Amino acid sequence: MKSFSIPIISSKLEKNTDQVLAEAEINGIELEYLWPKYAGRSLFTGVFAAAGSDGLGFSFAAEIPHNKVIAERTEPHTRVFDEDCLEVFIQPTAPKTSPAQTESPQTDKQNCTYYCWEINPNGACLDYCVDYGPAVDALAGTTEEEHAAFKAKSSYTGQESVRGKLYDFVAEKPLFFDYDRIPKAKWVQSVDDEFWYLELFVPYSSLGLSEPPKAGDIWKATFNRIDAPRTKPGQKKDNPKPGLASLLEDTNWPKFHQPEHFAELVFTE
């Protein structure tokens, strides 16, 4: 499992996130292409992250040759993951009770909820929460019939508007996607000088927290990039694959939603 140090700083990060992070001289984290068939154009993507007094701040710098991006969607909660996209998936360590856990015996031994933001170059964002772990495993059962009943609970139709709830499996692990449970955040982005820049601020209240993490706390997370397949006019390509870069490690499944393979974020003063 990869591990990265995330500094705790006394500054507020809601405004001028990128500027505050730059002044703090924070080391960047470079995303890697784990799956050779999904290496795409193998573009550079760096992320700077810190915990401020009011929330978490992230600053992306993503290489975009010739400033050309694939992004048609402008509305929130649409399929931005089909286009060029930058993502943050983050799981705090503080115990919580999720909606999925209300349908089975609850557990407070481990937080099994992570929070997601997927943003395209137009600023369209898909934000939602995902539950996994023992409570969701119990809902999914062990037989094919129980698996089918678990997935049948979904209300998300798979259409352009991404709303509702999705009970599904990724890398053979059951996950509960709640697209109606939206963690609040603020972001701005721009495309300039052959780079796409994204600033994301996440208040602690969006993570169910009332205070910053403490030195030594360890969270789980992955930062991701989707580089949509490029094809020239008139060119035909069978099953074009996107470029997928992330912080995941030790998995052959080309999917980001694998919390057991997320990296560790170790908070330091």
Image: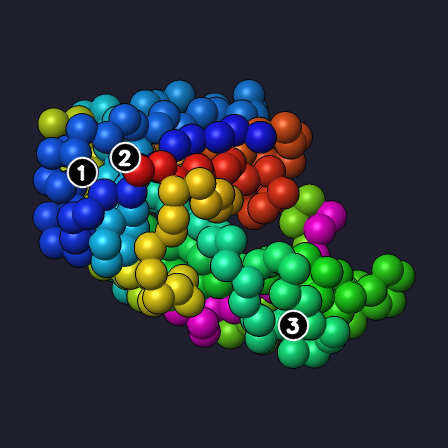
Query: Picture coordinates of residue 211 (x, y %)?
Result: 33, 61
Residue annotated with mark 2: 48
137 on left or right of 182: right
Secondary structure of the residue carrying tag 3 is: helix
Residue 23 or residue 16, whichever sits in front: 23
* Residue 202, placed above or below residue 5: below
Residue 60 horizontal/vertical position (percent)? 26, 37
At x 29%, y 27%, the residue is 28
The alpha-carbon separation of the residues under discs 1 and 2 comes to 7 Å
Q: Is residue 212 visible?
A: yes
- Whether residues under marks 3 and 2 lie with C-beta atoms below 8 angstroms apart, the answer is no
Pointer 1: what residue? 21
Q: Amino acid at mark 2?
A: Phe
Viewport quadrant of the C terminus: top left
Mark 3 lies on residue: 101
Tell me how far mark 3 sits from mark 1, CA to CA.
Answer: 37 Å
Q: Secondary structure at mark 1?
A: helix
Query: Of marks 3 and 2, which one's residue comes earlier in the chain?
Result: 2
User: Label 2: few (<14), some or many (≥20) within 10 Å?
Assistant: many
Hey, which quadrant is residue 132 in on the image?
Answer: bottom right
The verdict on residue 179 being magenta is yes
Q: Nearer the viewer, residue 263 or 139?
A: 263
Q: Position of residue 165 (x, y in %)?
A: 56, 71
Q: Position of residue 77 (x, y in %)?
A: 37, 65
Going by the numbered disc 1, the residue's amino acid type is Leu
Nearer the observer, 258 or 118? 258
The region drawn magenta spans 172-182
Q: Is residue 153 above or below residue 237?
A: below
